[in-house]
Amino acid sequence: MGKYSLALPVLFVACLLTLADCAPDGRVTTSQAEIPAIPPGAARVWFFRGWDAPSGQGYVYAATPIVYANGAPVGDLPVGSGFFRDFPPGSYSFTVEPYGLPTSQATTLQLAAGAQSYLQAQWIASWQVGYPEADFSFAPNTFAILAMSPQVAQAYLPTLTYLGQR
């Protein structure tokens, strides 16, 4: 046996793992997807969840909170993803499964035909939504659904995995 007999197989395996990491995993970002036009008489709402700010709570990355419109489930949001749903015009109250302390937090939108709105599920401190006396050693955080300006959302969405229309 030569002095490199073990190094060659290890190098080969390392190269294979590197190549496997470069292979496409089937995920498409919103910048790569063909997004259909908004149907006549409908309003579009984009739902997305970026990369939650470091919270010291690693389990939040694995959470896939469900978004609700007027109490009906719309879809779940894994970290780093987004999707849209078309709605008839009207007033809608959007909430998200908290995963932490339950809150009454909601975002209400008046949807108009042809318009697009953008809502982000975000991991936030519970004191921001009504728990001022929370014991912070307990790390009382929760998810909230927050409106985002079109300019910021349209710049952010292309970086997320596109989950399609829900």
Image (spheres, helix red, strand yellow):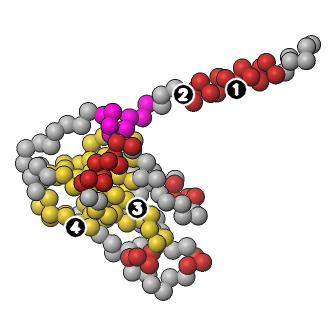
Give the main secondary structure of the magenta stretch: loop
Q: Looking at the image, is mark 1 or mark 3 earlier in the sequence? A: 1
Upstream in the sequence, badge 4 or badge 2?
Answer: 2
Give the residue displayed 55% in from the left and 79% down from the top: 136
Count of numbered badges drawn on the protein: 4
User: Is mark 1 in CB contact (under 8 Å) with mark 3?
Assistant: no
Camera-side residue: 21 or 152?
152
Residue 149 visible in the picture: yes
Residue at left offset 32%, top offset 37%: 31
x and y percentages locating residue 43 in the rendered image: 14, 51
- Looking at the rendering, in which quadrant would you find the C terminus? top left
Which is in the foreground here, disc 4 or disc 1?
1
Quarter of the image with the N terminus is top right
Amino acid carrying mark 3 in the image: Gln
Say whether disc 4 or disc 1 marks the residue closer to the N-terminus: 1
Asked whether 23 falls inside the magenta stretch, the response is: no
Residue picked out by circle 4: 108
Amino acid identity at mark 4: Thr
Q: Which residues are magenta?
A: 26-33
- Dot 2 amino acid type: Cys
Q: Which residue is denoted by mark 3 in the rendering?
A: 122
* Separation (CA) of disc 2 from disc 1: 13 Å
Residue extending farthest left = 41
**Residue appearing at x 60%, y 78% in the figure:** 137
Q: Residue at x 22, y 67 (%)?
A: 108
- Residue identified by numbered label 2: 22
The Cα atoms of the two marked residues, 4 and 3, are separated by 16 Å
